[in-house]
Image (cartoon, grey):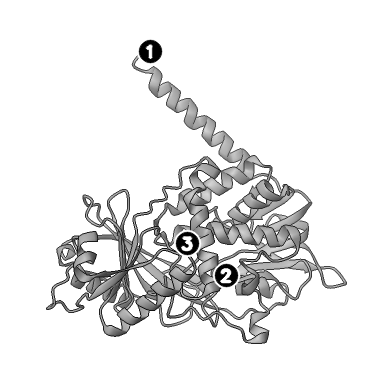
Amino acid sequence: MSKFSFFEIMRKALNHNEDWQRQWADPEPKKDYDIIIIGGGGHGLGTACYLAKEHGLTNIAVLEKGWIGGGNTGRNTTIIRSNYLYDESAALYDHSVRLWEGLSQDLNYNVMFSQRGVMMLAHTDHDRHSFQRHIHANRLNGIDNEWLDAGQAQDYCPALDISPAARYPVIGAALQRRGGVARHDAVAWGYARAASECGVHIIQNCEVTNITRHANGSVSGVETSRGFIGAKKIAVVAAGNTSNVMRMAGVRMPLESYPLQALVSEPLKPVIPCVIMSNSVHAYISQSDKGELVIGAGTDQYVSYSQTGSLPVISHTLEAICELFPIFRRVRMMRSWGGIVDVTPDRSPIIGETPVPGLFVNCGWGTGGFKATPGSAHVFAHHLATGTPHPVNAPFTLKRFETGRLIDEAAAAAVAH
């Protein structure tokens, strides 16, 4: 082999990949589909993938107004866990964790899932009682979660300051060892490739401008920036913009949209071996495979469709991180970003049918959307394909707001994550 042959091979491979990408990621839309999915993020692409792979439905189009994975999927901190308090939430999120554990093999694409553990810090007696309640509830549901004292917490994450003189003294922590992180854009690409290989159309730069209906009220299709596209069923999976899309069909949703912020540091050598979260001070941190410290906080205190957020939230978060990890005080931050999250009154998602025949919705995840990606897509695909809810998503339909049987995970979600 000559010294240039390797580069020639790589050049041809890259050119082939670009041609392949153009072929599958931006086809000309057909006139009619069985199902149109509005939203080309992780949940939308995952839903299309499972509809094709598990239910044999391939006459499907995923419509994305920008590029795939360019919304909230690409604007999160990749935390994965299932240590939620209520039975319904625990079942949904642990269903997702189990799918995460085999996702790279299922998609034949490395989503970089790393079960490094998620540790939630307790700073007060109230924190300790709350987390121990979570631990007992999780164990009753067969979900791993355990209590660590302050010394054990530092053993698991040596950089953590557990000094009694600290501004936020650590008195213990709840640890879910099966929790961890994954690569957000890899999840979108993995699902996109798998769906495309099954025959699903993924159409980028195709903004939906209206949802049309037959005389009997059922959906007939969508008006888009690339013309009208007919459909028997429409599934809205447009995180952060669900209310706007659903308004096109005359449906009002019990949602509010908030900015959610995060940021990353300059790359460092490995120093944070797990995910650390602190509900009391609203801060969390992990380290990416590139060495960046991934830092985030709770939602802003005001509703907005802005993807920028506010400086006070970032400033408070960094102050808290520096108190918990004094060694990071001289680390430089590289960039920050913001996403938009849809929040329901009970901080739990809505998955299922709407009052409009043929119109389905998957929304309201708040800040729990990324960790739920495989589970959400899997049960939503089941509902779309069969017309009946999957047992896991049955409690999360719109009807719970009529009966008042809410699943209030506001406090159980920890730092809104």
First in residue order: circle 1 vs circle 2: 1
Label 3 residue SS = loop
- Disc 1 and disc 2: Cα gap in Å? 53 Å
Q: Check disc 1 and report the residue beneath it.
A: 1
Residue 365 in sight here: no
Left-right relation of 226 to 187: right
Q: Check disc 2 and report the residue beneath it.
A: 241
* Percent coordinates x, y for residue 240 in the rendering: 54, 70
Left-right relation of 187 to 246: left
Label 1 residue SS = loop
Residue type for callout 1:
Met
At x 60%, y 71%, the residue is 242
Label 2 residue SS = loop
Residue 287 in sight here: yes
Circle 1 crowding by C-alpha within 10 Å: few under 14, some 14–19, many from 20: few
Closest to the camera, between mark 2 and mark 3, is: 3
* Percent coordinates x, y for residue 310 in the rendering: 36, 75
First in residue order: circle 3 vs circle 1: 1
At x 43%, y 77%, the residue is 412
Residue type for callout 2:
Asn
Total number of numbered discs in the rendering = 3
- Disc 2 and disc 3: Cα gap in Å? 19 Å
Q: Check disc 3 and report the residue beneath it.
A: 371
Residue type for callout 3:
Lys
At x 17%, y 79%, the residue is 167
Of 25 and 206, which appears nearest the observer?
25
Of 176 and 240, which appears nearest the observer?
176
First in residue order: circle 2 vs circle 3: 2
